[in-house]
Image (spheres, rainbow, N blue to C red):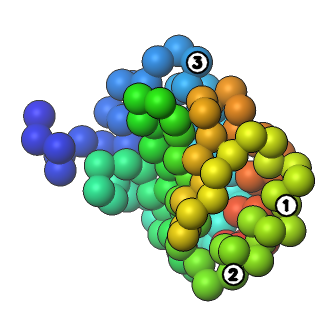
Amino acid sequence: MKKRDVTLTDYLDSLDSEARPVFEELRQIALRRMESPKETMDYGFPAFRGNGVFGFSARKNYVSLYFHHQRNREVVEKHKDQLGKHEFSGETLRFPDAAAIPIPVIAEMVAELFG
């Protein structure tokens, strides 16, 4: 299968048993909290386009959440104490693994940015 032919479902199916439920929950957050989201695969990872772009990916040593919105720095700064162990650079939040993602905080951030 060519990389560009991978669907969001294919991507989720490829995740390990620890990451998949977290990424399924992130998908549901995007669908419920974003205004008119459109599911896509951008650069090989799931993304949701609406009032900006929210995406996520699993890497070998970390997981990333992408917030493409003009207010992303402001919202990350507002919630930084609730995010736990993370790195933030540009439009990307990185966590050591899927279990480290604070789902309720991310849901609130998605709603603030894209709702």
Q: CA distance from mark 2 to mark 3?
A: 31 Å
Estimate the x, y position of residue 8 in percent, counting from the top left: 38, 43
Q: Amino acid at mark 3?
A: Glu
Q: Is residue 9 visible?
A: no
Query: Which residue occupies the foreground of this view, 62 or 58?
Result: 62
Q: Earlier in the sequence, mark 3 or mark 1?
A: 3
In the rendered image, the quadrant that contains the C terminus is: bottom right
| Residue found 43% across the figure and 25% down from its top | 15
**Left or right for 64, reference 43:** right
Query: Which residue occupies the foreground of this view, 58 or 24?
Result: 58
| Residues packed near mark 1 inside 10 Å, few (<14), some (14 to 19) or many (20 plus) | some
Q: Quadrant of residue 111?
A: bottom right
Q: Is residue 58 visible?
A: yes
Of helix, strand and loop, which one carries label 3? loop
The image shows a total of numbered marks equal to 3
Estimate the x, y position of residue 109 in percent, counting from the top left: 76, 62
Q: Quadrant of residue 37?
A: bottom right
Tell me the number on the disc at residue 79.
Answer: 1
Compared to 108, does 25 lie above or below? above
Q: Amino acid at mark 1?
A: His
Of helix, strand and loop, which one carries label 1? helix
Q: CA distance from mark 3 to mark 1?
A: 25 Å
Q: Which residue carries the number 2 mark? A: 71
Q: Which residue carries the number 3 mark? A: 18
Q: CA distance from mark 1 to mark 2?
A: 13 Å
Q: Earlier in the sequence, mark 2 or mark 3?
A: 3
Tell me the number on the disc at residue 87.
Answer: none
| Residue found 42% across the figure and 50% down from its top | 46
| Residues packed near mark 3 inside 10 Å, few (<14), some (14 to 19) or many (20 plus) | few
**Left or right for 82, reference 40:** right
| Residue found 54% across the figure and 70% down from its top | 90
| Residue found 80% across the figure and 68% down from its top | 77
